[in-house]
Image: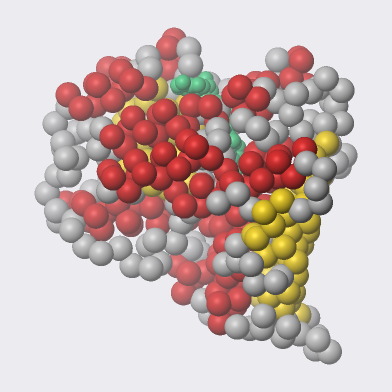
Amino acid sequence: MIEGSKTDAMTRKLRMGMVGGGPGAFIGEVHRKAARMDGHVEIVAGAFDIDPAKSREMGRILNLDPKRAYDTYEKMIEGELKLSPEERIDFVSITTPNNWHYPIAKAFLEAGFHVVCEKPMTMNVEEALALRDVVKKSGKVFALLHNYTGYPMVKHARWMVKQGMLGKVQKIVVEYPQDWLLKRIELEGQMQASWRTDPKQAGAGGCLGDIGTHAENLAHYITGLYIDELCADLTTFAKGRLLDDDVNVLLRYENGAKGVLHSSQISTGQENNLNIRVWGTEGAIEWHQENPNYLYFYRQGEPVQILRRGGAYLCDAAKRHTRLPSGHPEAFLEAFANIYQNFVATVRAQLSGAQPTELDLDFPNVDDGVIGMQFIETVVASAKSDRKWEKFHK
Ligand code: NAD
């Protein structure tokens, strides 16, 4: 067991360990900043890099006890379990390339630690289902970093759909174009591109797994709808690349709604242009990740309403995840921190024997990870198939 005294768990900082996020890595540093934003978390250990020397270097940068900058994740588990429950980590954040997510998450859960894991959750559906079993069996808290669900205006969009303000959802258009993989920078050793274009490290989807899954998850989070079947076209435009760099999908949802999802990493001029529009029988919403403090609400024949982060009229979830007064922009780091905020609240509740609230539990979990892997598998199958529509692989 990793708990100290029960009352202590509600006030002390939770002790975080990290796997991945070594020198020069991208998302590990974002996790470190986001997790500590609200002062509820301290980083005490890590196996930060595939290269043990770099893991130790990161330990020095973070001013950790050198004994807790481990050479490998296996040694980290071993080392942490030797410490007293008052010292050892409460949870681990996994920020490695995709092929490592499953073995590392499984090992930490089975050793009794809570887990925050990057997406896509695993390499395939089989691993995803196995991980779901491990999470359930362990009773530990598992958060998946679909960070776009952390934005207050996304939470408000979800609330509006739930309140029926859009009527019945009929159409969803979600897109996530980028341009950074237009050229084969993986051949120049660019670290993030190298593993993302290698099926052994990324899985069956390239752009599909990397950002297509974010688009799928965002549409599901806001509307609550499940995909029934889809028709996909995957393309690799960069000659010689082994995975897709452009994704186009038509979606049929279980309630009869239709959707269009596209993601791309060869769309010149596009940075992280994640956008979603949802049309219902009574109204519509529109949200743009690159301008995330605003949510547009349309009703036929009426002037557009621009809802703004910080407004007193917003739902509880949006208000809970707002740190600054309106007009002072919050964005990517804060949305990331919001996932951590709810994860931490849920872990604290568990450590102190309390029930987490519905707002505490508002973060992507292992079930979302399973859907993400099923989405990748179904899209790949559809793209390879001669038939037009592929039933969603459940
Ligand atoms: P990166 O290449 O920048 O960093 C990966 C790090 O993991 C490196 O430090 C590497 O040495 C380390 N590593 C690899 N294998 C390891 C192992 N077995 N043990 C310890 N460390 C190991 O990659 P990145 O861009 O930061 O992506 C990492 C993960 O985060 C991927 O799964 C990616 O899909 C995800 N990601 C998510 C978001 C998001 O918005 N949620 C954004 C970027 C990346």
Front-most of residues 306 and 371: 371
The quarter of the rendering in which ligand 1 is drawn is: top right
Residue 66 visible (yes or no): yes
Viewer-side residue, 223 vs 186: 223
Task: Estimate the x, y position of residue 14 in percent, counting from the top left.
Answer: 29, 44
| Residue at the limit of the structure toward the front, as seen here | 387
Residue at the farthest top position: 53
Q: Is residue 264 above or below residue 197?
A: below
Going by the image, does 207 lie left or right of 102?
right
Q: In this view, does 235 lie to the left or right of 308?
A: right
* Vertical placement of residue 39 versus 121, above or below: below
Residue 237 relative to residue 126: left or right: right
For the point 46% across and 56% down, which residue is it?
Answer: 363
Above-or-below relation of 251 to 283: above
Relative side of 343 to 230, left or right: left
| Residue 73 coordinates in the image, percent (x, y) | 37, 22
Q: Which of 123 and 230 is in front in this view?
A: 230
Question: x and y percent of residue 313 in the render?
Answer: 55, 81
Residue 179 in sight in this render: no
Indicate the quadrant where residue 234 lies: top right
Image: 16 above or below 169: above
Snapshot colouring: secondary structure
Quick one: quadrant of the N terminus?
Answer: top left
Q: Which of 252 and 317 is in front in this view?
A: 252
Which residue is rendered at x = 72% and y = 63% of the image? 252
Quarter of the image where one finds residue 209: top right
Q: Residue at the location (59% across, 46% down)?
A: 374
